[in-house]
């Protein structure tokens, strides 16, 4: 089964508007002949700036989170309606920093996933185990629970707007990458979980990105694996010099 590659940059809580504009312009010019699917996901305050630059290009516009409700008394939150208004196409949900620093649980993440899909967005649902969970032999169980609960109530017809990102928490921002073999094994497992929920055809189609210290020098080996369909890149997404070689891995 040949699936397209999808390389996404999660800019996290970095950059001012001027810095974001500079990066977005560099990506637009250096990726215009890129052959894969691309995404830039800046902070909320930068979205409008980046939107004006990536509009009409091959770089999709992403957000890093959304509120679980469309409007109301939710101080500090940002709604899917507000994101749509800015031209956001994709929302990253369930990132490990949301799960572990801000204590988002599977039920909350699932609510956001369903709301984002209902409003026409593509969703990147992040799953992944902590180091102690991996060491206790629980990596698969954790990824299964997060995948099953994250997708609860999601209709098969909406699954073509769902991407899963496997991000082992111990590999995020640490310089430690899962070996391509270890990552591929979990990706294959997650695909099997999706197959149990939605059938083999959907499982074969769904894109599963790997995230966790993806760099220009390890991207190609990861992407060469059967079940790895792209990357969700943090640190290396902050500079065109490191994101572009990942996005154009050979
Ligand atoms: P990293 O982050 O590439 O800096 O490890 C990945 C992520 O958190 O999406």
Image (spheres, helix red, strand yellow):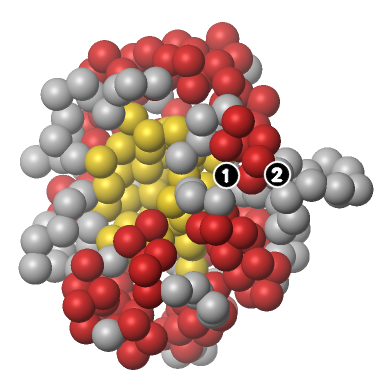
Residue under the image location 38 percent in, 13 percent down: 25
Name the residue nearer the viewer: 34 or 79: 79
Residue under the image location 49 percent in, 22 percent down: 51
Name the residue nearer the viewer: 109 or 214: 109
Q: Which mark is residue 3?
A: none
Residue ID for mark 2: 79
Q: Is residue 101 visible?
A: no
Q: Is residue 243 visible?
A: yes
Residue 162, placed above or below residue 5: below
Q: Position of residue 59 (x, y in %)?
A: 33, 30
15 relative position to 10: left or right: right
Name the residue nearer the viewer: 81 or 52: 81
Instruction: Tell me, yes or no, whether the two marked residues, 2 and 1, touch with CB atoms within 8 Å.
Output: no
Q: Quadrant of residue 48?
A: top right
Counting labels gives 2
Residue ID for mark 1: 64
**Disc 2 versus disc 1: nearer the observer:** 2
Q: Position of residue 99 (x, y in %)?
A: 65, 64
| Quadrant the C terminus occupies | top left
52 relative position to 250: left or right: right
């Amino acid at each position: 089964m040949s699936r397209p590659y999808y390389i996404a940059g999660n800019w996290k809580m970095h950059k001012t508007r001027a810095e974001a504009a500079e990066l977005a312009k560099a990506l637009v010019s250096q990726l215009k002949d890129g052959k894969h699917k691309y995404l830039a996901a800046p902070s909320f305050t930068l979205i409008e700036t980046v939107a004006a630059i990536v509009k009409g290009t091959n770089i999709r516009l992403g957000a890093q989170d959304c509120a679980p409700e469309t409007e109301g008394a939710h101080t500090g939150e940002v709604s899917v309606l507000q994101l749509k208004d800015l031209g956001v196409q994709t929302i990253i949900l369930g990132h490990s920093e949301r799960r572990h620093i801000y204590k988002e649980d599977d039920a909350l993440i699932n609510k956001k996933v369903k709301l984002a899909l209902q409003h026409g967005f593509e969703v990147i649902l992040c799953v992944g185990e902590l180091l102690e969970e991996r060491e206790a032999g629980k990596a698969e169980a954790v990824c299964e629970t997060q995948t099953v609960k994250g997708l609860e109530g999601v209709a098969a017809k909406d699954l073509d707007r769902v991407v899963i990102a496997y991000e082992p928490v111990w590999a995020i921002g640490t310089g430690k990458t899962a070996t391509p073999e270890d990552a591929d094994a979990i990706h294959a497992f997650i695909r099997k979980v999706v197959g149990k929920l939605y059938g083999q055809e959907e499982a074969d189609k769904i894109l599963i990105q790997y995230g966790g210290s993806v760099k220009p020098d390890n991207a190609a080996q990861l992407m060469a694996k059967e079940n790895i369909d792209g990357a969700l890149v943090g640190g290396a997404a902050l500079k065109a010099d490191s994101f572009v070689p990942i996005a154009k891995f050979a």
